[in-house]
Amino acid sequence: MRILEQHKVPYEVLTYPDTIHDAEEVAEILGVPYFTVYKTLVVQAENPTQPKPYLVLVASENRLDLKKMAVAAGVKKVKMAAHKDAEAMTGLKVGGISALALMQKGWQVYLDQPATQLQHIVISAGQRGTQLRVPVVP
């Protein structure tokens, strides 16, 4: 939230029970369209030339196409990080991994293209149970 405030980006804090980890369930509880809730995935290059994994924001109902992600990242092949590995690498718990929380740590962030067609998306604030509704800036 400090990063958003620092850059004068308006946002809305949305909270829900931190026992819920599924992005589509989060959308239902928050009363927002499911396609506006974006989950943050941790993806690794299989032959890492990139020192840090990638963060990929994908709409709650979508699955990441690993082949397309590899092309976007300019690597031969990528794989999803296991939950325990994602938590160890980011220092955040799965369900609370936030691209915003990791921006100043040099992580490459990829946003799924359909988000650019929306006015706002809902993303993790960096802890389970807290989301942020933020504007999409193309």
Image (tube, rainbow, N blue to C red):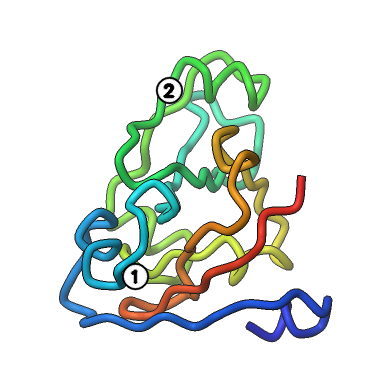
Is 28 or 51 nearer to us in this picture?
28
Q: Which mark is residue 106?
A: none
**Residue at the spot x=34%, y=70% of the render?**
93
Residue 47 in the image: above or below residue 114: above
Graded by Cα atoms within 10 Å as few (under 14), some (14 to 19) or many (20 or more), the crowding at tag 1 reads some
Label count reads 2
Q: Residue at position x 49%, y 75% from top?
A: 125
Point out which mark residue 66 bears.
Answer: 2
Q: Residue at x 65, y 30 (%)?
A: 49
Q: Specify the quadrant of the image occupied by residue 80.
A: top left
- Identify the residue shown where x is 61% and y is 39%: 117
Q: Is residue 8 above or below residue 22?
A: below
Measuring from the top left, give residue 7's x and y in whole percent: 83, 76
Amino acid type, residue under disc 1 in the picture = Lys
Query: What secondary structure is found at the residue carrying circle 2?
Result: helix
Disc nearer the start of the sequence (1/2): 2
Q: Within 10 Å of the Cα at label 2, are there few (<14), some (14-19), or many (20+) other Cα atoms?
A: some
Percent coordinates x, y for residue 45 in the rendering: 52, 30
- Mark 1 to mark 2 CA distance (whole Å): 22 Å
Q: Which residue is mark 1?
A: 93
Three-letter amino acid code at the position of disc 2:
Leu
Q: Image quarter for residue 103?
A: bottom right
